């Protein structure tokens, strides 16, 4: 009989990192022109994350901002050389729901071009900055990804918050139906939990930092048993209490920095518990596409 915290070896989960500078935010209260000198914080924090992955024999999927690739290509080279997947996280971390289709197309191509130039391989994965895919842009979002031969997106928060999300969006990995047509691009959405009808995340960012570790682990087991695939997601700054700080209003400051001191410990504990289940997103999507043939 399995314990409540046991791991099924056929469970599949993903470890993902959004590789961006410490000041890469989309809060309206932040003037990003005031922040342009990153120092060496990103390099140090990515080195730490890659070290943690190596200790646990886990390969992650890294969604990388194109501007980082342009300014610090050695980070991307190291990520790739250690066997982690390189995917796109836009070119300059601008929210997609503020773009026209042509602007998004240009941003996507610019990002993928520079990443592909560095690693010598096709980019097949994409994650929107700040979960900025909403209902209004769905009709053209997946079409443009498909034009670039992107095979999967991990961009949708399948619930509505004051910052982002799409209400009633499926939580399973699927090929979305847009105007009755199944898209060739797969979506790997967040998996959420509900409290009194309200949906919340738990496996990354503020949610992972704020929730008790035992509760996060129980939710991963529970969702896996229901056939859901969880992705853990973090930003390099979230394991660095000494990272420079943005000047933010109280609520945004809480969302951005609460629980940073304990985040590395939580990450290490989750990876230790669920180590056999983590694979790269692109590998899983390639398996799905092969099984569809």
Image (tube, rainbow, N blue to C red):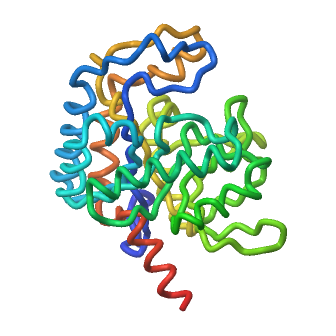
Image spot of residue 256 (x, y percent): 49, 22
| Side of 139 where 114 appears, left or right | left
On-image quarter of the N terminus:
bottom left
Give the camera-side residue of 33 and 288. Answer: 33
Image spot of residue 138 (x, y percent): 73, 55
Give the camera-side residue of 129 and 106. Answer: 106
Name of the residue lying farthest toward the bottom: 293
The residue sitting at 30% across, 51% down in the picture is 271
Above or below, comparing residue 159 to residue 210 in the picture = below
- Residue 10 can be seen, yes or no: yes
| Side of 264 where 152 appears, left or right | right
Above or below, comparing residue 293 to residue 248 in the picture = below
| Side of 123 where 40 appears, left or right | left
The mark tally for this picture is 0
On-image quarter of the C terminus:
bottom right
| Side of 163 where 123 appears, left or right | left
Image spot of residue 223 (x, y percent): 55, 59
The residue sitting at 34% across, 37% down in the picture is 68
The residue sitting at 41% across, 41% down in the picture is 65
- Residue 274 can be seen, yes or no: no
The residue sitting at 38% across, 66% down in the picture is 122
Image spot of residue 116 (x, y percent): 34, 58
Above or below, comparing residue 241 to residue 280 in the picture = above
């Amino acid at each position: 009989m399995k314990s409540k915290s046991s791991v099924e070896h056929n469970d599949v989960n993903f470890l993902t990192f959004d590789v961006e500078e410490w000041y890469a935010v989309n809060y309206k209260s932040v003037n990003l022109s005031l922040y342009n000198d990153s120092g060496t914080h990103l390099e140090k924090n990515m080195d730490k994350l890659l070290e943690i992955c190596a200790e646990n024999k886990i390969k992650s999927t890294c969604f990388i901002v194109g501007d980082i690739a342009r300014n610090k290509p050695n980070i991307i080279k190291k990520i790739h050389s250690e066997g982690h997947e390189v995917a796109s996280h836009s070119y300059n971390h601008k929210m997609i729901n503020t773009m026209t289709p042509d602007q998004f197309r240009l941003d996507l191509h610019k990002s993928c071009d520079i990443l592909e130039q560095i690693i010598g391989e096709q980019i097949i994965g994409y994650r929107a900055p700040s979960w900025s895919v909403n209902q209004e842009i769905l009709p053209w979002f997946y079409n443009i990804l498909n034009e670039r031969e992107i095979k999967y997106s991990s961009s949708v928060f399948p619930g509505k918050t004051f910052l982002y999300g799409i209400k009633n969006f499926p939580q399973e990995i699927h090929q979305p139906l847009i105007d009755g047509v199944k898209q060739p691009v797969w979506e790997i959405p967040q998996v959420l939990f509900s409290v009194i009808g309200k949906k919340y995340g738990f496996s990354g960012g503020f949610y992972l930092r704020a929730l008790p570790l035992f509760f996060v682990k129980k939710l991963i087991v529970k969702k896996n048993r229901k056939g859901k695939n969880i992705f853990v997601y973090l930003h390099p700054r979230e394991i660095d209490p000494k990272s420079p700080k943005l000047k933010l209003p109280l609520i945004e400051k809480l969302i951005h920095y609460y629980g940073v001191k304990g985040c590395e410990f939580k990450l290490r504990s989750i990876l230790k518990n669920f180590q056999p289940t983590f694979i790269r997103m692109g590998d899983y999507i390639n398996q799905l596409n092969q099984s569809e043939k």
